[in-house]
Amino acid sequence: MRQSIEGYARPVVKNELRRDVERVLLTLDVNGERSQLLVPVHKTLLEVLREDMGLTGTKHGCELGECGTCTVLIDGRPQLSCLVLPVQVEGRAITTVEGLAVGSELHPLQQAFAELGAAQCGYCTPGILLASRALLDVNPKPTRDEIREALAGNLCRCTGYVKILEAVEMAATRMAG
């Protein structure tokens, strides 16, 4: 059986593995390091970070932009990497949870989360940490309501959010001096 699409005819093979996927050469700036990658055009930023760059801290959740587990910072703003194509962020600064710590020194948010036990299973934690960092970068002394609003797109099924809110408050206090 042959199938014709706009004058292009090729055999249709049931369950065939497509090896002729269109790819694009991109330069991505992730956690301060530039990388050149040959990426299939259909892959999301989430898939490229995890599968091609080995940065598995960014979690794969709903693929619909509803859970926040895939949150990364793009030019300092929280974005859902499951909804972003890598070609859209070429030349922009991308920060994943792996980019929060400086060497072996944890970011104050990471330290506060660890001290207060704000993470249980930890699946949502990378996205929450990055959304929190974006908040504290623009609002160093947020109210609890402002923290809640900033984290509204990040779902956690384990905690009651109380320790998460306390950890963000603790980090804000420490970062303010």
Image: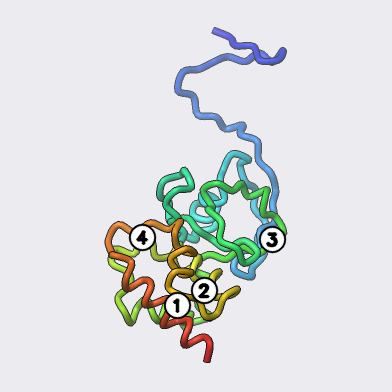
Amino acid type of the residue tagged 2 in the rendering: Leu
Name the residue carrying label 1.
109
Which dot marks residue 92? 3
Q: Sequence order check: which comes first, mark 3 or mark 4?
A: 3
Q: Residue 113 location, x and y as percent? A: 37, 76
Q: Sequence order check: which comes first, mark 4 or mark 2?
A: 2
Which dot marks residue 100? 2
Front position among marks 1 and 4: 1
Marks 2,1: beta carbons within 8 A? yes
Amino acid type of the residue tagged 3 in the rendering: Arg
58 or 155, nearer to the observer: 155
Q: Residue at coordinates 53% horizontally, 87% vertically from top-left?
A: 176
Pointer 1: residues within 10 angstroms few (<14), some, or many (20+)? Answer: many
Front position among marks 3 and 1: 1
Amino acid type of the residue tagged 4 in the rendering: Tyr
Q: Sequence order check: which comes first, mark 2 or mark 1?
A: 2
Amino acid type of the residue tagged 1 in the rendering: Leu
Circle 1 SS class? helix
